[in-house]
Structures are given as C-alpha cells and as structure tokens.
Amino acid sequence: MEYLDNIGKRAKKAAAELALIGKSEKNNALNTAAKALITNKDFILTENDKDIALAKEKGVKESLIDRLRLTNDRIKAMADGLSDIAALDDPVGEVISMKERPNGLIIGQKRVPLGVIGIIYESRPNVTADAFGLCFKTSNAVILRGGSDAINSNKAICSVLCDALKSVNVTPDAVILIEDTSRETATELMRLNKYVDVLIPRGGAGLISTVVNNSTIPVIETGTGNCHIFVDETADLQMAADIIENAKTQRTGVCNALESLVVHEKATHMLPAIAKRLYAKGVEIRGCEKTCKVLPDALPATDEDWGTEYLDLILSCKVVSDIDEAIEHINCYNTGHSEAIITNSYENSQRFLNEIDAAAVYVNASTRFTDGFEFGFGAEIGISTQKLHARGPMGLKALTTTKNIIYGNGQIRK
Amino acid sequence: MEYLDNIGKRAKKAAAELALIGKSEKNNALNTAAKALITNKDFILTENDKDIALAKEKGVKESLIDRLRLTNDRIKAMADGLSDIAALDDPVGEVISMKERPNGLIIGQKRVPLGVIGIIYESRPNVTADAFGLCFKTSNAVILRGGSDAINSNKAICSVLCDALKSVNVTPDAVILIEDTSRETATELMRLNKYVDVLIPRGGAGLISTVVNNSTIPVIETGTGNCHIFVDETADLQMAADIIENAKTQRTGVCNALESLVVHEKATHMLPAIAKRLYAKGVEIRGCEKTCKVLPDALPATDEDWGTEYLDLILSCKVVSDIDEAIEHINCYNTGHSEAIITNSYENSQRFLNEIDAAAVYVNASTRFTDGFEFGFGAEIGISTQKLHARGPMGLKALTTTKNIIYGNGQIRK
C-alpha cells in the first residue's frame, strides 16, 4: 500500500536523523512540545469535542467517553509528562561494556535507538503525546495508529507536536500519525517490517492477540494481567487483608489489579475477615467448593473463572492444600504479569520467587506496584508480559537496542 | 494438532523442572551427554549413513551431502562442544540489579531461563547437539525441528542425549525432536505460542522469511549478511587488501563474509592492487561504471547486485564520491549484520561507527570476526540481525530473560 509505504520511508529517514541529534537538543524539543500543548489547548479541546460528539451520536457508553475526553487538566498532564521525560536520564549512547580481545580487537556494546517504533492503541488520546515523548527521548521515530474514535483529537495533538518540532529545526516526521483508521491499514502496518523495527500494541486482549497473530514485525506484548495473591499458612491476617483490598479495589480496570486469590487450606480461617473488607468495597467473590463452605455469600466459581481477567469488582478464590498446589495453579492460569505471596515462611517466600513464572513476583506487597513509575523508571511505555527483549514495566531502556562497535588496527581472521 | 500440543506440554513441564536444577547438576549432565556421543558414535554413524544413502538416491549435490555427513571427527567436535559449554559461566540466577524504593520495597532483576525454545534448522545434524547444549546450560527446554534430510541422524543424536539425561536423573524432555518433518508440522510449530517462548530459525534466507511471516511466537531473526567494506580516501592500501581478501575469501559461504566493496573515488587507485589479490583467489568482481573503468576485467554490476548476498566467490564494487554517499549506500542495502570501514580519518571512523545501522560495525578489521567465539562468548546459538532482545552474536545470555523479584513488608499502593 503506497500510503503506508510512504509513511514507512519518511519514518526511517527521520530515525536516521534522530539517531544523530544531541541530548540537549532532544530535551529542548520535548520542552518546546510541552509548552505547545498548553498554548494550543483550545484547539485540541475543540477537536476533542468533535470526537466526543461523534461518540455520543453513536451511543458509546459513558465510561468509554470518559477515556476519550480531554480537559484542561488532562492536557496539562500530557505536557507535564513530556517535561518529565525531558528531565530523565537519556540511555542512548551509553557504552555498556568494552573489552580487548587477545588479538587486539576492542569490542564494545553501545546503546542505540531501536529505529522506527510502531504503536497501535485504542481510545485514550493522551497516548499520542506519551508515546511520542518516550520514543523521541530515545531517538526513535514513531508511527502511531490510534483508534478511529479519537482521530480528531489525535490529529490535533500530533499537528501541535509536529509544529513544535519544526520550530526547533527537528524533523516533524519523528512522529507520524496514520490518519486512515481502517482495519486494512492497521493490518498492513503490522506487515511493514521493511521499515518498522518494533510494534507495541497498547489496549485490550483482543487488540493484542490480533497484533501477535498478524504481525511480521517483532512485537512487544503488553498488558493482560490475571494476577494472583497466595495467602500462605503463615500469613499475617492484617497484612493479607490490607494488601488484598488494595490490590483488588484501589483501581479495578488495570492490568496489575488482583483477579484471583489462592488460599492455603490452613489459612481459610482468615477468609471471613478478608471477605468482609472486600464486600464493604462491593467486590463479588466467586469461590471453589472449599471457599464457599467458609464464605456463605460467595458464588460458586466455574473453571472459566480461573482464567478470567475481570478488570472489575469480582475476585475468584481457590483453596489449595499446600504451596505446591498453589504454585501449580498459579503457573497454569497466570498471564505472566504480577503474582504475590503473603507469608512469614522464608522457605516458601524463596520457592514462590523462584518457581512462579511471571514478569514480577512479590513477597508481602500489593501487585499494584508493577508500574514504570513505582519501579523508579520515571515513565513507561507499557508492561511487557513476554520474555523476549523486555519483561515487566518498560522504561526508556526498553526502547533501545545495542550495537557492537569494534576498533581494529588491521586484524584479519586466521 | 494433538501431536505438537503434547510435545509443547512436555517441554513446558520440563522447563519448569530445569529452572530448578543446580549448576553442577547441569554441567554433570552436559559432560555425561558429551561422553555418550563418543560411546555411541557407531550407532550415530550408522544412522547417518542412512541419511547419506537416501540423499545420494535423491541426487542431492555433493556440497549438501558434505554438510549432512558425520565422521568420527565431527562427532568428537559435537562432544567437545558440549564439554566446552559445561565449562562456561552460567548466567542463570544472577541478580543484575537490586534497589530499595522510597516506600521500602526492594526490587531486583534476576536472570532466569526463557522457558521453552523452538529451533527450526536445515541439514547440519551437529546443530542438534549444539542447540541442546546451549539451551540446557541456560535451563531452557528445547524443541528441535531439523530438516527431513537429516532425520535419522537427528533421531540418533537425540536419543543418545535423552538417554544420557535419564542416566543422571534429569528429564529427557529437556530436548524433544519433532520426528514428523512435514511442512504442516513446521507451520504448526510456528503457532505454538501457548507453549513456546521463543523461536530461532537457523538456515537460509528462505527459511528465515517463512518463519518471520508465519510465526506467532516471538522470533529471533538470524543470519543473512550482505556485508560491506568501505575503503576510505585515507585507507592504508596494504591493510585494505589484507582485510578485503580475508573477509571475502577466508570462507565464502558464511553470513559474515564480505559481499560488497564500497570505494571512495579518491581511493580508486588502490583498486587494481586489491583486485589482483582477489583475482588470485578466483573472485569475480561486478562493478559500477567507475569501477569498470579502473578494473577492465570487472563485469558490469546490475542494481540487483547491490542487494545480493552471494555466499560465493563474487564481490560487487561501487565507487562513491564521499563518506556521505558510502553511508547512504550501505544503510540502503545492508542486512543489519556486519559493516567495516578502512580509514585513517578519526572523523570518518566515528561517523561510520555512529551512522551505520548494523549489529556489528568495524574500523580497520575484517567482518569475519562477527562470531560468538571471536567476541569471547565461548559459544553462540546464532547471529541476530534484528534489534529486539539480542543483536549480533548470541551467547548464553541471549537465551535468558529477567524476572522482577520484589521483597516487601506489607506495602500497599497509595
């Protein structure tokens, strides 16, 4: 498709230019873009109103319209995001290691940009500015394909960013929005491996599996989190109740929220107190047979419940006979995101850390901490649930690769 | 497909067991497997004879039969390979970093196995033992799908390895050979992302592009190398001739061999002396118009030549007006493998290192050094030409991922 081929070429050319831009020039551009978002907020809000009006016309439900809506505060948050990124350490250019080989060759690994990053996302228009900021800081060009619902908002934000880049003599092709929001174009983008080095889908499970199944570009899978907490025999009841309430109810629609409780059969006496805290927050509990015996108000869980990421005020609960069964159950149903144990047993804490296969494994803490800011990365482009390249919250380093640089003085291979 | 689903399940179960095996236990198993290859060499040679006979019957050409053939020496080399891997440092379990956050959470990144690795390869049966060794050392289970030509050899090697593992009480499912060598099964394997964490194709450009286009499993692309050497204006003629002869002729069928020469127009006076060395080794030169003026024996190159990885005694040659044109030409046609400049200009050496987009970029050395052994990794599973996860020669670390381990004492998110 000529339209996308042309976008790919422009992005690749921009990436080559961005790879040579100095750190202070990049930070200046980010700060300029941040100011431009504020200066042009009325324009952005007017364009956003068009998206909101169209969504209302189509009868989109209020919770989705809220995700789409921009306000003065939300635009300020986008601008602050860009300034915050400008203030972060820039990982590009760092030489991670350098060694002399016996033949005198000096071989080093230098951190360099990935090149061109493609991002496919759903309705939140703030992703447009956030993704640009993180990609630009790491000298990558980014091709954005947002949802059709937010197209006017995305176009407005993107044009403000591009104008800001032009004003400081940086190529505006550093961020290119695909304005054609058809499915065909999205599918075509997934096969643009001639130009795009990495594709990052941000959105629900459906979007992610479409990208994984169709992309010929290397993908970083993000997102789905069927997160468990295991209450061990030796758990402290107060700590367990605090952590479980926090992980389940502090925010329900996020990937690091608790979805399933696993309880040692010698800890079931703690369940009523834990359930009381959850019921007070409006949580529905779906339990196995043993759970239902202890919690008369729990609904019976079906097999499907164990594999479900509710993203809602619902929690499944399974009683297990020991830590072996807990680990087996969690490794069977977890999506490789965040898993926690509440215990006072040294041995079980170590076994859980070693044997659970997930991006983040916790002892005695809420799963809600799996997040680039909480991990100290300053920002994040998403949470990887795959094992290749990056795992868990992805900060700036996840948007770089390395290049082997080799200094010789005439070496030939024997 | 039930056949593959069953293999996937066995491999995943084996991976969970391997993740918990101690380092000395792994090394003992590798050394036992090395000895078993020697002890059972007659069996392996007999089975290999069957493949050779079938290949001859089918009229396979001698160079391919040679790749298929095992000898006492080649079996010894496989066994030595396993003992060498046993002697390497084991990266699994290393905690790369660990920090305390302001809220008291202690967050570390620990190096862990990838899990299940799939390897699709062509006719060389030694890959069976090599791939097993590297994957096993890093506590990964491996599913092997070799070529149909080598099926009897691969089955023999695999059964020897499995018996050796059993003899030291390690699960033989650490290495599973797919005995059904149909295309359908290979395609099915590429979509087994429920069980397989990473897929590594090893073979020609056709195999690699089939895997990239069909796999839903994250792929590490390896192999193709359209490698260039740029002879700058200030190059030392003797050094240039030595390096070019070495890179082009030391071994021609390998991915880090030189395929295309790029010459500064003020360095064309060096071309006759360089060509003389190459002609003496039987190299055919295909040049641009300016090349042909200086080298009357050169054949005219077509546009197709610039993008061709010959893997043969053929070299394309292009004269450029300056380093800008050289960088542009190389970045247009290179496959992201290995690129070199011969120069005495500090500025141009730095520009080449910074601006050329490839896994390995050399100043004044042969491209032939792009190799896990030459880089000091002790072994390699392949050379990545992609940017995600690993770039350039992949040693043991490339077969690992990290897991975030978090020690808390009741932290909840505010």
Image (cartoon, coloured by chain):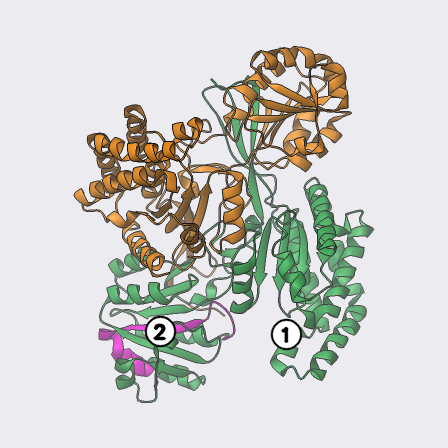
Chain colours: A green, B orange
A65, above or below A101, in the image: below
Q: Residues within 10 Å of mark 1 (few under 14, many from 20)?
A: some
Left/right placement of residue B22 relative to residue B122 reads left
Q: Position of residue A133 (x, y in %)?
A: 67, 55
Side of A300 where A154 appears, left or right: right
Between B408 and B291, the residue placed more toward the observer is: B291
Q: Chain of mark 2?
A: A
Instruction: Determine whether A304 is above or below A179 in the image.
Output: below
The answer to whether any part of residue A294 appears in the image is yes
Mark 1 lies on a secondary structure that is helix
Q: Which residues are magenta?
A: A252-273
Q: Are marks 1 and 2 on the same chain?
A: yes
Three-letter amino acid code at disc 2? Leu
Q: Nearer the viewer, residue A246 or B209?
A: B209
Cα distance in 3D space between marks 1 and 2: 29 Å
Mark identifier at residue A67: 1
Tell me if I can see residue B96 in this picture.
no
Residue A66 appears in which quarter of the rendering?
Answer: bottom right
Report the residue at 29% width, 32% height from top.
B49
**Residue at the location (29% across, 47% down)?**
B174
Amino acid at circle 1: Arg
Judge from the rendering whether residue B187 lies leftward or rightward of residue A80; answer left or right.
Answer: left
Residue at x-position 56% and y-position 52%: A216
Label 2, on which residue?
Answer: A261
